[in-house]
Image: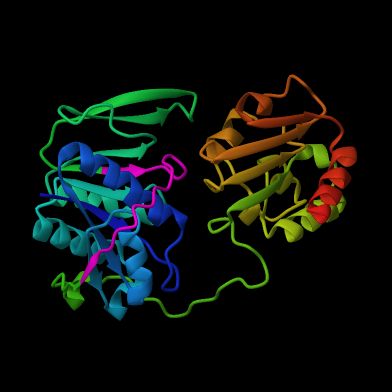
Amino acid sequence: MSILVYTENWDGKFKKLSFELVSYATAIAKEMGSTVTALSIGNVADDELNKLGNYGAAKVLNVVDDRFGSLDNRALAKAVVAASQNESAKVVIFSHSNLGKAIAPRVSVKLDGGMVSGVTAMPLSIDPFVVKKKVFTGKAFANVQINAEVKVITLSQNSFELVETGGTASIEAFDPQVGDGDFSTTVNETNKITGKVLLSDAEIVISGGRGMKSGDNWGQLEELADLLGAGMACSRPVSDEGWRTHDEHVGQTGKIIAPNLYFALGISGAIQHLGGVSSSKFIVAVNKDPEAPIFEAADYGIVGDVFKVLPQLIEGVKEM
């Protein structure tokens, strides 16, 4: 019996969230007396696959098939199911990313398993299998018991610390036996945004709200983002006013992000906004209203005029 982890890669490289998944799975495996198998789909070099062993994976199933480049959910789910059955996995773990949230339900149905999405911590118990997740837009937690023999979960980013084990993993080529008929998605053209950090990839995000007063005042936010190599974001009122484009809108009705560091500058912190950023590892808020809801969610807060605080932040970063 093994724990299976689906590890996403970006252009052949793993990011922190994949290593977080393996670390999390390794901790569960210790309690279950099991081992961790990582599934990698894509053209990933052996030296990159070996990194998964450093976080506890005993085996890596490597699927190299250009057809999966279309990210077809049905085909990917079939590959994960094949790997799960090959390893007799009783726990299957995905990231709570767009891809993970799309594949996990399909896998759960095919394996006749029980599924919980957005898990935020280690299982409270193994037998029965009880996990913790956020509910009501992060305002409360629920403990959910999975009774099915196969447990399928998606792990929220920044829910578990990276733990290096110094181990190595055996790498095995794996053929999930997926036919052409399983692929229903065709990619005709791929256009990638260049010259800016994508929100989905950003480890640091600089976000502005209505407190910035005008779209003309974004220069200092952009300067801070450039200095930190950060992505740019905004609250919904900002995008609705046309100060920034809608692709930068984060929140319950925008993009859901989980960077390591989130700067909320001039953002009051409405519940809809917090619903999209509450999984950030650290939140730094700047607002002149000491009663602003954002301070309830922030790890660090500065009560002050954002136009006076921003220049000092920029100078501080420059000095570093």
Measured along the vertical axis of the image, is residue 67 above or below residue 54?
A: below
Quarter of the image for residue 179 reads bottom left
Whether residue 65 appears in magenta in the rendering, the answer is: no
Q: How many marks?
A: 0
Q: Magenta segment, which residues?
A: 153-171
Identity of the residue furthest to the front in this view? 166
The answer to whether 53 appears left or right of 319 in the picture is left
Question: 153 or 109: which is nearer to us?
Answer: 153
Quarter of the image for residue 70 reads bottom left
The answer to whether 103 appears left or right of 248 in the picture is left
Across and down, in percent, residue 209 comes to 74, 40
- Scheme by which the image is coloured: rainbow
- The answer to whether any part of residue 215 appears in the image is no
Residue plotted at (37% across, 61% down):
8
Across and down, in percent, residue 182 comes to 20, 70
Across and down, in percent, residue 307 comes to 88, 41
Measured along the vertical axis of the image, is residue 171 above or below residue 224?
A: below
Whether residue 164 appears in magenta in the rendering, the answer is: yes
Quarter of the image for residue 145 reads top left
Would you say the magenta stretch is mainly helix, strand or loop?
loop
Across and down, in percent, residue 201 comes to 54, 59
- The answer to whether any part of residue 259 appears in the image is yes
Question: 12 or 160: which is nearer to us?
Answer: 160
Question: 258 or 218: which is nearer to us?
Answer: 258
Identity of the residue furthest to the top in this view? 291
Measured along the vertical axis of the image, is residue 303 above or below residue 312?
A: above
Residue plotted at (34% across, 54% down):
55
